[in-house]
Image (spheres, rainbow, N blue to C red):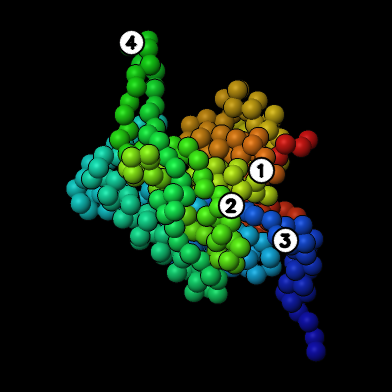
Amino acid sequence: MTFTTSTQNVAEVLAEALPYIQKFTGKTLVIKFGGNAMTDEKLQNDFARDIVLLKLVGINPVVVHGGGPQIGKLLDELNIQSSFVDGMRVTDSRTMDVVEMVLGATVNKQIVSLINRNGGQAIGVTGKDANLIHAKKLQVSPRSPELKASEIIDLGHVGEVKSVNKKVIDLLLNSDLIPVIAPIGVGDDGASYNINADIVAGKVAEVMQAEKLILLTNVAGLQDKNGKVLTGLTTTQVDELIADGTIHGGMLPKIQCALDAVKSGVTSSHIIDGRVAHAVLLELLTDTGVGTLITNHS
């Protein structure tokens, strides 16, 4: 029997993955699923297969998902106006109903179904289930140059995480299930809150003391001022890049979330390119990786 070059390549890739599998077996990884990876059919399938493979080799993935484009689409169809403050959707009661419908039902169940079709055992939950995510109302204070003062803006049902019920996630992982979490929290008064999925993923990773927090994005990773991807950074270097303005705009909250997780005990955070097929496996189980790694170590 003759072996082709491609067959040999497969064997080499598997051999390269082995030490990573050994290192991460039994560890928890929190993966935020969003961006192109979530809307492109092939990338969706690649992601689901990656998650199933991780579980099969003894790694514990926890998936947190967003759904901004899907929410926006349904709001448009229902003629409900959307507005944003600092990248966060102002969420009144009608909008919150749509958010819960899209995130908690449609998107969550699609991801669960996709993982299960690929041989996994996923279970979908929102932060309201078993009080998984205890939330409070988020208020932002952008500075008004005219008034030279901070103006408090009420974003309605937009929340921030007060606490995460670790027992619920432990119960699911110990039952050999793959949790898929929709970023909806519940307040003291039982009200629902729409929470940024990156922030939920970061807080879940902190509470679980996860080995890794992985955020899928629509860019190649964190870039310097010349557009070059920065592959490995310490928390100190990230702080410096924020201070000098290299990290700004829409990437800032995502990086801040990754940074906070590492500073709170998560071993490493990864900002990876969700537009690349099998991005999760490439980042975790190969020497090359497909994004930016943030750790506490030099």
Amino acid type at circle 3 is: Thr
Q: Distance of mark 1 from mark 4, alpha carbons?
A: 41 Å
- The residue nearer to you, when weighing 256 against 105, is 105
Crowd tier of the residue under label 4, counting other residues whose Cα lies within 10 Å: few below 14, some 14–19, many 20 or above: few
* Residue matched to label 3: 25
| Residue type (three-letter) at the residue carrying disc 1 | Val
Residue 184, above or below 118: above
Q: Which residue is at the front of the view, 201 or 67? A: 201
Please give the name of the residue rendered at 55% of the width and 38% of the height, measured from the top-left corner: 257
Q: Quadrant of the C terminus?
A: top right
Query: Which sits in the foreground, 111 or 223?
Result: 111
**Looking at the image, which residue is at 75% across and 68% down?**
14
Could you give the CA–CA distance between mark 1 and mark 2, rounded to whole angstroms?
10 Å
Q: Mark 3 vs mark 4: which is more N-terminal?
A: 3
Task: Please name the amino acid that badge 4 sits on.
Answer: Leu
x and y percent of residue 180 in the render?
49, 58
| Residue type pointed to by label 2 | Val
Q: Earlier in the sequence, mark 2 or mark 3?
A: 3
> Circle 3: is it few (<14), some (14-19), or many (20+) Cα within 10 Å?
some
Graded by Cα atoms within 10 Å as few (under 14), some (14 to 19) or many (20 or more), the crowding at tag 2 reads: many
CA gap, disc 1 and disc 3: 16 Å
Q: What's the distance in space between the residues labelled 2 and 4, CA to CA? A: 42 Å
| Residue tagged 1 | 266
Can residue 227 be seen here?
no
Q: On the image, numbered disc 2 is attached to which residue?
A: 30
Q: Confirm whether residue 95 shows in the render.
A: yes
Q: Do labels 1 and 2 touch, CB within 8 Å?
A: yes
